[in-house]
Amino acid sequence: MDVSEIAIGVGQIPSGLFIVVAEGEKQIDGYLASWVQQISFNPLLVSFAINSSRPGYDTIISGKPFSINVVGDHDMQYMRHFWSSYDESPFGQIEHERFGDGVIAIKAAKAVIECEFVSKSQPGDHEIVVARVISSKILQKESKPKVHIRKSGLDY
C-alpha cells in the first residue's frame, strides 16, 4: 500500500488545537500545535510534538515555565497569527494576561495550562516534549475545545 493511502486514515485521528507560548529574553513567542496529550495522572504530565525550529523552543527546553493555550470553538481569530512563521511576535496584537508564575494566557482561549519541561525525545521529524503541569485555568466555561481532523497524516 502506498504511504499516501496509509496516511489518509492516520489523518482521521482527531486532535485539539493549541497555542504553546514561551517568553524568552527578547519576546513572547508561540506556535500552533495539534499534537498535545495528557500522559500521566501522578505526576500530572502532558506531552506535545514540536519542531526544534519553532519559536519558543529554546525557552521551553530551558526549564522556564510556559503555557499551553487550548483553542475553543467560540473564537479562533487569534490562530491566524500562528499559521506561518513570523519575525515580530504577534502578542502585540493578541489580548493576553499573565497567569500563574507569569506565563501567557491568551484571553480568547478556552483554557490555559502552565507547564515546565521534564524531558524530550526525537522518535521522528518532531521532538516529543514531556512537561509537568503546574497549574491551569478555564477562561471560557461555555466553549468547547476545538477539534481538528487532517486530510492526511503526512501534513498538518
Image (cartoon, grey):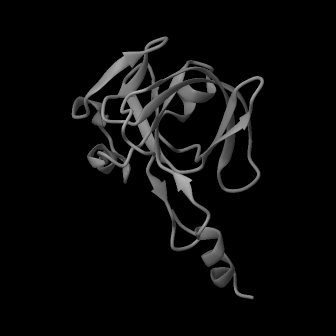
Using the image, determine if residue 120 lies above or below residue 15.
above
- Residue 110 image offset from top left, x and y in percent: 40, 36
Q: Residue at x 37, y 16 (%)?
A: 98
Q: Residue at x 36, y 33 (%)?
A: 140
What is the residue that sits farthest to the bottom in this orientation?
A: 1
Count the numbered circles shown: 0
Q: Residue at x 41, y 43 (%)?
A: 71
79 or 145, which is in the foreground? Answer: 145
Q: Is residue 53 left or right of residue 98?
A: right
Q: Residue at x 72, y 56 (%)?
A: 124
- Residue 12 image offset from top left, x and y in percent: 59, 69
Question: Is the N terminus in the top left, top right, bottom left or bottom right quadrant?
Answer: bottom right
- Residue 74 image offset from top left, x and y in percent: 31, 46
Using the image, determine if residue 115 lies above or below residue 87.
above
What is the residue that sits farthest to the left in this orientation?
A: 93
Q: Is residue 28 left or right of residue 67?
A: left
What is the residue that sits farthest to the front in this orientation?
A: 142
Corner quadrant of residue 121: top right
- Residue 42 image offset from top left, x and y in percent: 78, 24
Corner quadrant of residue 129: top right
Q: Is residue 35 left or right of residue 6?
A: left
